[in-house]
Image (spheres, grey):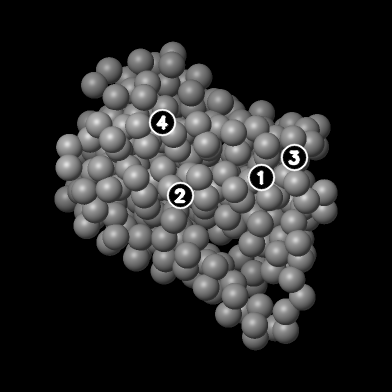
Amino acid sequence: MRARPALSFVAGAAVGLLGGLIGLGGAEFRLPLLVALFGYVTRDAIGLNVALSLVTVAFSLAFRVAGGGGAPLLEHASTVLTLAAATIAGASIGVAIGRRLSAAALTWVVAALLLALAAVMVSHALDPAGGLRLSLPPLAQLLAALAAGVAIGIVASLLGVAGGELLIPTLVLLYAVDTKIAGTLSLAISLPTLLVSLSRWRKARGGWSLWTGNARLLLWMGAGSIVGAALGARALGWIDVRVLSVLLAALLVYSAVHLAQQARRAPR
């Protein structure tokens, strides 16, 4: 399959921009591009997506820290560790679920999850305060964080995503941090989750052939993602996140519709 370097770079940069700006891996937007523009089947696209999400998340976090946004990581270290451990557990479960689904069923699951993520983005955009805050006692807060983290890890591994769209509102709801800080924390939480997801997908595929066989696409799209992440992190203070969240929700709905159409055509 041709890597189409220029298109790969531009697509990676566009998705990386979203990652750097909001605190996402951007895989929800990259997935339909891998399917529609580059012709990958959903299962292969998800495997490639995990690696590209890892690049986007790692560099988005690095650029945010380099820009002076690293202090919240120390202040909220226990929160990061709690949610990271839970999402890693969920990611392991999610890959096992993904291996047992047919291509058509997996595509339907991905489409449904994209719609769910769109609803999260819309609710986040409509609340001027960045989402409701829950005041829970410490033990209840811990249990809620663990449960949410496992669920997010399952979603993340099924889609090959970082899970930031769910992590950010979870952090806002449970820990009353603002949206920008939540984005930085979500990147730190997502990084080990994606490492586990990549390891699990490699084991499920029986090796690295999917990734080595598409090295040119990964190189060009990864390079674009790094450039986009740098631009997004730099523009963090310039754009109203509520407006951007509405646009992201619209893109998620479009992606879900596209994948649902593909699922109808897929062999049973």
Q: Nearer the viewer, residue 150 or 233?
A: 150
Q: Nearer the viewer, mark 3 or mark 1?
A: 1
Q: Considering only order in the chain, which callout, 4 or 1, is on the residue closer to the N terminus?
A: 1
Q: Can you identify the residue that label 2 sits on?
A: 113
* Residue at 34%, 45% in the rendered image: 108
Q: Nearer the viewer, residue 98 or 218?
A: 98
Q: Can you identify the residue that label 1 sits on?
A: 122
Question: Real-space Cα distance between discs 3 and 4?
Answer: 25 Å
* Residue at 64%, 46% in the rendered image: 121
Quarter placement of the C terminus: top left
Residue 136: image location, x then y, percent = 72, 79
Q: In the structure shown, which secondary structural element does the residue marked by tag 1 occupy?
A: helix
Question: Real-space Cα distance between discs 3 and 1?
Answer: 11 Å
Question: Real-space Cα distance between discs 2 and 4?
Answer: 13 Å
Residue 97: image location, x then y, percent = 29, 60
Residue 211: image location, x then y, percent = 28, 37
Q: Nearer the viewer, mark 3 or mark 4?
A: 4
Question: Real-space Cα distance between discs 1 and 4?
Answer: 19 Å
Is there a contact, CB below 8 Å, between mark 2 and mark 4? no
Q: Which mark is residue 63?
A: none
Q: Considering only order in the chain, which callout, 4 or 3, is on the residue closer to the N terminus?
A: 3
